[in-house]
Image (cartoon, grey):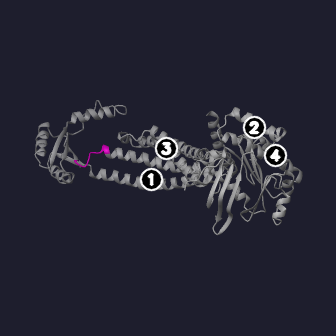
Amino acid sequence: MRSETTKAMVELKGVSVAFGEQYALRRVNLKVEAGEFVFLVGATGAGKSTLFKLLYGALRPTEGEVWVLGQPVHRLKPRELPYLRRRMGIIPQNYPLLSHKTVWENIAYGLRAIGYSEQAVRQRVAQMLALVGLNEQARQYPHQLSGGEAQRAAIARALANNPPLLIADEPTANLDPDTSWEIIELLLRINLRGTTVIVSTHNRTIVDRACQRVVAIDRGQIISDVPRGGYPIELERLYPSVAL
Amino acid sequence: MIDRFRFIVNETWASLRGNLAMQVAAISTACIALILLGSAAMALYKLDALAQSLPNAFEASVFLHTTVSRAQTLKLKAEIEAMPEVAQVVLVPREVAWEQEKQKYKDEVNLADLPNPLPDKLIVRVHQAETLPAVSARIAQSSLVDEVIDSQAELEMVLGAARLVRWVGLGTGGLLLLSALLLIYNAVRLTIHARQHEVQVMALVGATLRSIRLPFVLEGMVQGLLGGIIAALITVLSAGLLSEYMVSQWPLLKDMPPGLPPGVVLVGVPILGMVLGGLCASWATLRYVRI
């Protein structure tokens, strides 16, 4: 039966991912509308990264449908994936900056790879550096940056093509609380500009402070979906065992 | 378009620069393999040309005694023509042959004042190659005939040499070429591994598979091309020097048919290296560059 297209920014319909006998995700249903800011929370190994990989086509679901920006990712051919990814900003976990390139060159690299002219590259990189507050560090190499600055550079690189959707897998991992909140503030500002943002984390403090929609995942299943402003009281009442 | 081209060239250069030892190994092996293949091709071409220049298997040359008159020659010619196995007999008069020799060696020696030492020659062609030895033997019995030469022995020798060159040259060259291709494959595979972060970034920002793979394919093509250029230069120079040396030792070799033109080797071998290098690199990228 032919699936119907969706107008949601992201929609997962009955999605399961199995590696042999083991299920990383089981019958997941999720819908994210344009302009939303969504936290995906859960313990390590809960299935957050698997879900993210489904969104940008690095994994295929064992069953179910994955729709992103109106595209059926579950049945896109490899040659069609790049055109979807150009409309997404992707910050995977352990997504290092290129160590032999400066911040400026790191941001420019992605743009050049998708065919931007040199003039457009200069313009977009300058805009991104201003957006993430890294003008001063433009000529520095990754090893000269703090953890927060490196993460901001990664965000700038992901946003350089002006995508309507940004997904960030654990962007605050290994950052101190203040720097973590700086990164979340930056993502909230980006969301206010109209970009839909999905962030995975297990940092409870920042989820508490941000008061955005929170989707909790545990052992491959969505166990709660608390709308913006509803967290943390409702989630704790319903699922006190969820480890954040 | 220019920016895109510049990006691809920069990426290719970064790949080539990043793994210098492996590049040198791949290029030098490709070079040695292509030298062997190029030399074998040149030798085979020369032997083939030599085989073509020899009287064919249907033909024998009958040299008469220098004392034989033209009338006797014509009588013998008629007798041979009467043989049922014979298809044609052509007379090469001694004065015509002598004129040809004088022309051929005019740069080396002045033959103008010497008496003509050559005999009349009859070129005998038969209908079927297997009858040639018997016909030659019958003609040789005539008292007018000094010597009958059919080309069977020479032809066998040349074809034997060609077989040897083919098996040894192409076999060894082929094995080395296979090693070179595996080295190019391995060099590209290592480069892909060394540049996996760049590949990951390109894949995630939405670069097409083709544009991610192209710099690695170009890397393989450059390796093959460089190996091919060096091989072609060495092959052509060595062949030229060897040929000069052999002619200086045995002037009659000057009459040998010309070999493969150097231009063909200088263009063909690098192109062969480039194409094979590109194919190997494509194979490596198909296996190791995924999005």
Q: Amino acid at mark 1?
A: Leu
From the image, state whether disc 2 or disc 3 is nearer to you.
2
Q: Residue furthest bottom?
A: A21
> Label 1 vs label 4: CA separation?
68 Å
Q: Which residues are magenta?
A: B52-58
Determine crowd level at label 3: few under 14, some 14-19, many 20+ residues with C-alpha closer than 10 A: many
Residue A160 is at least partly visible in this image: yes
Direction from residue B243 to residue B158 in the image, left or right: left
> Label 3 vs label 4: CA separation?
60 Å
Q: Earlier in the sequence, mark 2 or mark 4?
A: 2
Q: Amino acid at mark 4?
A: Leu
Q: Relative to the observer, which residue lies in front, B80 or A1?
A: A1
Q: Relative to the observer, which residue lies in front, A229 or A176?
A: A229
| Quarter placement of the N terminus of chain B | top right
> Label 2 vs label 3: CA separation?
45 Å
Element on which disc 3 rests: helix
Disc 4 chain ID = A
Determine crowd level at label 2: few under 14, some 14-19, many 20+ residues with C-alpha closer than 10 A: many
Determine crowd level at label 1: few under 14, some 14-19, many 20+ residues with C-alpha closer than 10 A: many
Same chain for the residues at labels 2 and 4, yes or no? Answer: yes
Disc 2 chain ID = A
Residue A188: mark: 4
Q: Relative to the observer, which residue lies in front, A20 or B91?
A: A20
Identify residue for label 1: B170
